Image (tube, helix red, strand yellow):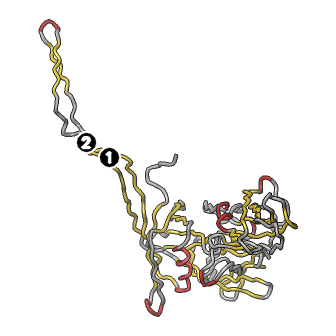
């Protein structure tokens, strides 16, 4: 099983101690690539190679390198409406080669190599340094909602999961067997079903263990729901539906300056025998001209969404949405909008304190109304 680097949190590696009087620095060569780990990547699979050097401190014989900040630059998140297990940049392999060096660059001893799997997730402060425990289903909450005529997508860890069962009660409606060919783009697998009878999903892992996720089917007849797809803490795409009232707003912005609208006015009159006479009037202006000139005018659309009543088991999903760096909204017509979350605070609600739970969130489109992409 691969060691996971969650690139939104630091991941540290410590070199071996080298007892050599001429030791001056350590050199790390880091390669990010796709394909199968352990094999030599082809040219098309390599996303980048970076070499870092770090000098030793006095009386020290080893150093520490931090990998996440470098690796995260090579991971890309794209969503076009498809939940594909072959997303090339969602998971990447990272190979490291470390050597001890003298001041003139001469290598000391042998090279130390290691391989990692990197995904754009994060660890929490309470989990400590280099937390690498892997989930089965790559979703924290054990409760999800789905619109009744749309599929439910469950992201799973292909290195741990054996199969996924979509069920109604204890009745198995369908089973998907999970296989792993070792390729990085297969490490997150999205298993789906649109069966309207589904009320729970059983994620089977380590052969004899299972994790159960409750699925609530929601029928909405009055409002036009929005689907919010975001990158969760495990580096996988996850959906949250906002079924109730939505309010769209437009926030405009511009710059302006005052300009002079005085203009010389020229008048021409015809005299006898076809002769013309021209006169010029100064210090005059038209009352329909703009003395205040507006430029760089643009606007950005926002939408306020309401979930409708949700189960408190979904609270962790809303927390992860709050800190997600990749969010897309899909309207009822199926149009996808890259978005950002405008809210900066989130109050967790529980059935004990709040009875019926509804969340309202404010999203802003991640683009301007007037196309200014150059």
- Distance between the alpha carbons at the discs numbered 1 and 2: 9 Å
Does residue 79 sit above or below 136 in this rendering? above
Q: Quadrant of residue 317?
A: bottom right
Q: Are marks 1 and 2 in contact (CB under 8 Å)?
A: yes
Asked whether 115 or 34 is in front, the reply is 115
- Per the image, the residue denoted by label 1 is 294
Residue 314: x and y in percent read 55, 82
> Would residue 296 be found to the left or right of residue 243 on screen?
left
Q: Is residue 136 visible?
A: no
Q: Quadrant of residue 169?
A: bottom right
- Sort mark 2 into few (<14), some (14-19) or many (20+) by Cα contacts within 10 Å: few
> Would residue 357 be found to the left or right of residue 178 on screen?
left
**Picture residue at 42% right of the left edge, 58% below the top:** 300
Asked whether 316 or 258 is in front, the reply is 258
Q: Quadrant of the N terminus?
A: bottom right
Does residue 94 sit above or below 273 in this rendering? below
Residue 200: x and y in percent read 64, 83
Residue 283: x and y in percent read 16, 32
Residue 176: x and y in percent read 75, 75
| Callout count | 2
Q: Quadrant of residue 282?
A: top left
- Per the image, the residue denoted by label 2 is 290
Does residue 364 sit above or below 123 in this rendering? above
User: Which type of secondary structure does the marked residue at label 2 adopt?
Assistant: loop
């Amino acid at each position: 099983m691969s060691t996971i680097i969650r690139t939104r949190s630091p991941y540290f590696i410590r070199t071996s101690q080298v007892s050599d009087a001429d030791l001056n620095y350590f050199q790390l060569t880091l390669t990010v690539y796709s394909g199968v780990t352990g094999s030599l990547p082809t040219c098309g699979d390599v996303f980048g190679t970076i070499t870092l050097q770090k000098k030793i401190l006095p009386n020290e014989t080893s150093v520490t390198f931090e990998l996440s900040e470098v690796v995260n630059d090579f991971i890309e998140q794209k969503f076009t409406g498809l939940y594909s297990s072959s997303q090339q940049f969602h998971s990447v392999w990272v190979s490291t080669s470390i050597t001890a060096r003298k001041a003139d660059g001469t290598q000391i001893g042998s090279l130390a190599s290691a391989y990692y799997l990197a995904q754009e997730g994060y660890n929490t402060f309470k989990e400590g340094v280099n937390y690498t425990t892997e989930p089965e289903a790559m979703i924290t909450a054990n409760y999800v909602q789905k619109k009744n005529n749309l599929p439910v997508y469950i992201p799973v860890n292909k290195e741990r999961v054996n199969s996924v069962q979509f069920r109604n009660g204890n009745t198995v409606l369908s089973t998907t067997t999970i296989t792993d060919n070792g390729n990085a783009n297969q490490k997150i697998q999205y298993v789906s079903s649109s069966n309207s009878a589904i009320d729970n999903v059983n994620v089977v892992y380590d052969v004899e263990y299972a994790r159960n996720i409750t699925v609530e089917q929601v029928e909405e007849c009055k409002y036009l729901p929005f689907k919010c797809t975001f990158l969760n803490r495990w580096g996988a795409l996850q959906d949250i539906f906002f079924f109730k009232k939505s309010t769209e707003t437009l926030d405009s912005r511009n710059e302006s300056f005052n300009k002079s609208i005085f203009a010389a006015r020229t008048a021409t009159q015809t005299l006898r025998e076809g002769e013309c006479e021209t006169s010029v009037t100064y210090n005059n202006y038209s009352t329909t001209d703009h003395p205040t000139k507006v430029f760089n005018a643009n606007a950005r659309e926002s939408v306020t969404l309401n979930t409708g009543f949700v189960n408190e088991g979904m609270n962790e999903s809303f927390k992860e949405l709050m800190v997600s760096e990749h969010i897309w909204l899909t309207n009822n017509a199926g149009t996808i909008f890259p978005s950002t979350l405008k809210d900066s605070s989130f109050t967790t609600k529980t059935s004990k304190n709040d009875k019926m739970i509804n969340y309202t969130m404010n999203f802003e489109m991640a683009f301007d109304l007037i196309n200014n992409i150059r």
